[in-house]
Amino acid sequence: MSEIINLSLLLFLSVLAVTIARLRNLFAVVMIAGFYSLVSAALFTVLDAVDVAFTEAAVGAGISTVILLGTLLLTTKEEKAPERWSPLPLIVVLITGAALVFATEDMPAYGDPNAPAHKHVAPRYLEDSGDEIGVPNVVTSVLASYRGYDTLGETAVIFTAGVGLLLLIGKSFRFRDPDGE
Amino acid sequence: MSGNIILRIVGKLFIPFIILFALYVQFHGDFGPGGGFQAGVIFAAAFVLYGLIFGVEKAKRVIHPNVLQTCIALGVLLYAGTGVAGILLGGNFLDYGALNSHDPVHGQHLGILLVEFGVGMTVASVMMSTFFLFASRGRPS
């Protein structure tokens, strides 16, 4: 049953991706990109990665759609048609895709308990986080406590992105004008 | 879009629940999926929805951009400050166990709560600032 769901979701994703690549109407592209994120979120849920699915749904389908729509206000509604058809992008995509498919051959099977990712620090987190951190959601205790330094870095990245945006296009960042706002 | 009565009414109905859900995700992240990042995004989404329906200028009156700019820095400071507090109380940087001298597990709980709150604050403020910046940029032209 789970294979059927996975397969249909993956099929759906590829159909959406091809649609995005073929469409020229940017509004439709933004909407389908949001839909693409929602379907990926469903796929992550099937893979039991609920936290990732949550983030994908909130960020990919929610906020980035809105921000892309905001960007659309600053640009045109239609993407320009390419002047002449070039096979180069297709070749690059096909080679990259083939390399990725080839690389998956060496990856451990999904849920394999002997996968390297499950052999290193994961058993310790799973066994000891209950006593050490006392938080039922191990994802939270890994993200916020064991790997707190990484999360601090991620927050700093978001901080930097926000400050960069404010400096680049923010008008209100100026010191207060003498004549009101 | 502010002329559309269905949007206005449904938006007004939904926004409190979106904010409530954001707070739930924020403070329930220890038990279920979610945490500061997701909560921040959902919290921002409520204000983005408000801005889309009632106009960016009205949304800016609810949360002033200067407040957002302060909160962007405040969230990171809260996170890093929690880490520094760990050093001052005799532990390592970001070692929340030191926050409570009696029970390290309670210290961990407190640390995770503060740190997630810092993440949520920064993420929500950055997302709202981004929306305000882009949305008010398109207006004049």
Image: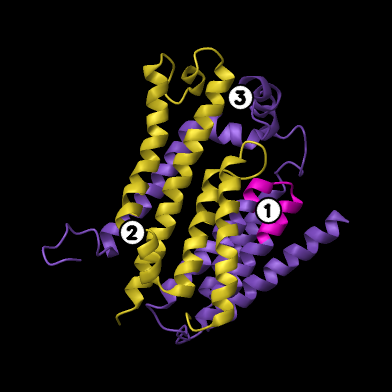
Chain colours: A purple, B yellow
Q: Nearer the viewer, residue A80 or A164?
A: A164
Q: Secondary structure at mark 3?
A: loop
Q: Amino acid at mark 2?
A: His
Circles 2, 3 touching at the beta carbon (< 8 Å) = no
Task: Identify the residue at horizontal 35%, vertical 64% (top origin).
Answer: B61
Judge from the rendering whether residue A106 lies leftward or rightward of residue B68; answer left or right.
right
The span from disc 2 to disc 1 (Cα, nearest Å) is: 52 Å
Judge from the rendering whether residue A54 lies leftward or rightward of residue A5; answer left or right.
left
Which stretch appears magenta? A40-53
Q: Nearer the viewer, mark 1 or mark 3?
A: 3
Q: Which of the two discs, 1 and 3, labels the residue nearer the N terminus? A: 1
Say yes or no: labels 2 and 3 on the same chain.
Answer: no
The span from disc 1 to disc 3 (Cα, nearest Å) is: 40 Å
Residue A19 position by quadrant: bottom right
- Residue A122, percent from left and from top: 66, 29
Task: Identify the residue at horizontal 63%, vertical 67% (top origin).
Answer: A36
Q: Which residue is mark 3?
A: A133
Residue A118 position by quadrant: top right
Report in which chain the residue with disc 3 lies.
A
Q: Which mark is residue A102?
A: 1
- Residue A35, percent from left and from top: 63, 69
The span from disc 2 to disc 3 (Cα, nearest Å) is: 37 Å
Q: Amino acid at mark 3?
A: Ile
Q: Which mark is residue B64?
A: 2
Q: Is residue A46 magenta?
A: yes
Work out whether B124 lies above or below B87: below
Q: Secondary structure at mark 1?
A: helix
Judge from the rendering whether residue B141 lies leftward or rightward of residue A122; answer left or right.
left
